Image: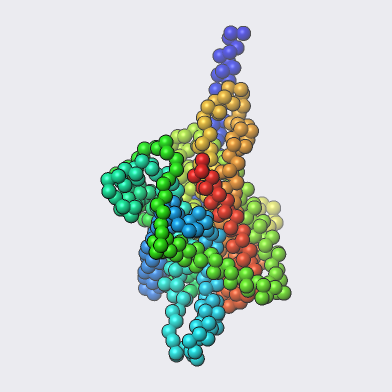
């Protein structure tokens, strides 16, 4: 009896060791699968693209660089001002409507920028409702009687992207302000600082990591945008990749443009890390959980209300009202043209991708919990690179190696069995879902990892002492406790897939259109009334996680 105890203990230790090792292996395999398109794009730098690259460098490359930099600069300034100021106002100040704006300011996240581009172009064109109303009010007869800005320009693209991307900064800045020590803010007030002095000298420096993280996300999304800049005729790297691939038929040159765009992304990340290499952010906790909000009155309250209302109105309310009006006025044809088939296609790829992303995220997060070593951390970091890479880059990184793999398999089978099987992966829904996973797996992983990190390790130890394997611990114990994080991850991935345009446009199977593709096609043909129903469907679906996320933040604040 006494001799059997050590044997049981050693056997159980061996099982746990083998199990944790297998988790590491699986996580490394996932990281390799996700990183393959990115590594392929990077390796394309060393491929000789012939004279086409020289032609691009002499003609359009400078324009791509300048426009991309101006787009980043304009969007960065705009999202910083709107996101940080609105976050401070709704968190620290009290004025009429401030509680409503806490979640209303998040709603522009539900509308992709290309929808705003199509909608505002239709609203602001010569025969649109805005200019027609102006001509009616002021008695103008023709375009020669007045000047009206052309929204189809670089500044128009910047405004559209600001209106939909500022919530990234707003969300993280607001979270940072909520988590700040109240004692620190009150100490600054006791030393004679006004509310705005406390903001600039205390709150803003402490919230810097969250603000910069939101800014980095917004700039990455700006560089990823295709529909807006293409519709407005602004040549950036994303339009250049698409034109080089489909217009010139040069895959190697398109891959090198994609690698060039990745350098922009990695430069952003490195600069942000370098800028705070020696900075440390510590805050003392406070037993006081309620923030004494500053009561704004008279013109200050009006300005605060106006500053919060304008981005909500421009980024969500105005385009939504216009889309609803178009759908109502074209009710007989709005849901024709295969609308429900397109909706099924969008739902299919979104659901499959969300479930697959959740499963892979659970494996990665729990594997990191089991064995938090160098290989595990490196694999997780590599797998999380996808969200920083634009969809057009991922599309290029997937199509070329997948096509080569398909051809190799087809040739091998034909030589062995004299049977022609064609392409197995290229041009199928499998390749499209693979692209979505590379792009959006980090979104699900972030939500799952955050939720899993709140579970005490003592639960794992107790379950293992009762003989449970890591797989059963994850399924029986952790998963039920992570319902909120799992639901958040699924919804975020689901909506991101519904809105994704660049990767879908390049990789989708033949005759497999989604709502996003149909909106793009109709808008490109100046048929916005036909695009209104699928566009409104994307907006309504996108509202679900936004409202849920806002509700979670409000609940955590109350707790």
Please tell me which residue lies in front, 21 or 137. Answer: 137
Where's residue 542, x and y in %?
58, 58
Please tell me which residue lies in front, 52 or 496. Answer: 496
Task: Name the residue rendered at 55%, 54% in the picture.
Answer: 546
Q: Residue furthest front?
A: 298
Task: Name the residue rendered at 55%, 19% in the picture.
Answer: 10
Where's residue 252, x and y in %?
47, 63
The structure's colour scheme is rainbow
Task: Name the residue rendered at 42%, 72% in the picture.
Answer: 155
Is residue 219 in view? no
Please tell me which residue lies in front, 456 or 470. Answer: 456
Where's residue 124, x and y in %?
51, 78
Is residue 136 in view? yes
Quadrant where the image shows the N terminus: top right
Task: Name the residue rendered at 55%, 66% in the picture.
Answer: 317
432 displayed left or right of 245? right
Q: Residue furthest top?
A: 2
Q: Is residue 249 above or below residue 281?
A: below
Q: Is residue 168 above or below residue 382?
A: below
Where's residue 40, x and y in %?
48, 55
């Amino acid at each position: 009896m006494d001799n059997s105890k050590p044997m049981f203990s050693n056997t159980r230790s061996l099982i746990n060791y083998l199990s944790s090792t297998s988790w590491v292996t699986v996580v490394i395999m996932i990281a390799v699968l996700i990183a393959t398109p990115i590594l392929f794009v990077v390796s394309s730098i060393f491929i000789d693209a012939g004279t086409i690259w020289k032609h691009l460098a002499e003609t359009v490359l400078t324009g791509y660089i300048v426009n991309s930099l101006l787009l980043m600069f304009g969007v960065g300034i705009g999202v910083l001002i709107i996101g940080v100021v609105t976050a401070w106002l709704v968190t620290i100040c009290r004025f009429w409507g401030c509680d409503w704006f806490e979640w209303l300011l998040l709603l522009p996240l539900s509308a992709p920028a290309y929808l705003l581009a199509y909608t505002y172009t239709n609203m602001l064109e010569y025969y649109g409702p805005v200019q027609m109303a102006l001509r009616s009010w002021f008695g103008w007869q023709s375009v020669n009687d007045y000047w009206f800005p052309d929204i189809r320009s670089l500044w128009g693209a910047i405004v559209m992207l600001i209106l939909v991307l500022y919530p990234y900064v707003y969300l993280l800045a607001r979270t940072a302000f909520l988590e700040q020590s109240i004692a620190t803010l009150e100490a600054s007030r006791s030393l004679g600082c006004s509310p705005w002095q406390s903001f600039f000298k205390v709150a803003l420096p402490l919230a810097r990591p969250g603000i910069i993280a939101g800014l980095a996300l917004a700039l990455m999304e700006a560089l990823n945008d295709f529909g807006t800049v293409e519709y407005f005729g602004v040549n950036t790297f994303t339009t250049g990749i698409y034109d080089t691939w489909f217009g010139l038929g040069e895959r190697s040159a398109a891959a090198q443009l994609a690698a060039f765009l990745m350098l922009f992304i990695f430069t952003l990340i490195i600069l942000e890390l370098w800028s705070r290499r020696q900075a440390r952010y510590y805050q003392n906790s406070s037993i006081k959980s309620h923030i004494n909000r500053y009561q704004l009155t008279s013109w200050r309250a009006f300005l605060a209300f106006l500053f919060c209302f304008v981005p909500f109105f421009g980024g969500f309310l105005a385009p939504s009202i216009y889309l609803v009006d178009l759908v109502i006025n074209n009710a007989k044809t709005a849901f024709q043209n295969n609308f429900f088939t397109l909706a099924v296609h969008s739902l299919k790829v979104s659901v499959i991708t969300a479930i697959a992303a959740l499963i892979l995220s659970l494996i990665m997060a729990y594997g990191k919990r089991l064995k938090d070593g160098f290989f595990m951390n490196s694999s997780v970091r590599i797998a999380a690179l996808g969200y920083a890479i634009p969809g057009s880059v991922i599309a290029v990184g997937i199509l070329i190696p997948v096509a080569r793999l398909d051809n190799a398999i087809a040739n091998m089978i034909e030589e062995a069995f004299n049977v022609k099987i064609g392409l197995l992966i290229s041009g199928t829904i499998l390749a499209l879902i693979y692209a979505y996973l590379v792009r959006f797996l980090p979104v699900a992983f972030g939500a799952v990892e955050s939720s899993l990190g709140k579970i005490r390790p003592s639960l794992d130890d107790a379950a293992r002492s009762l003989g449970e394997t890591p797989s059963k611990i994850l399924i029986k114990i952790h998963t039920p406790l992570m319902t909120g994080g799992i639901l958040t991850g699924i919804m975020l991935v689901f909506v991101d897939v519904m809105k994704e345009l660049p990767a879908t446009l390049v990789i989708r199977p033949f005759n497999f259109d989604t709502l996003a593709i149909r909106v793009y096609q109709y808008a490109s043909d100046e048929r916005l009334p036909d695009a209104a129903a699928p566009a409104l469907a994307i907006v309504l679906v996108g509202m679900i996680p936004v409202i849920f996320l806002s509700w979670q933040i409000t609940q955590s604040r109350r707790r």
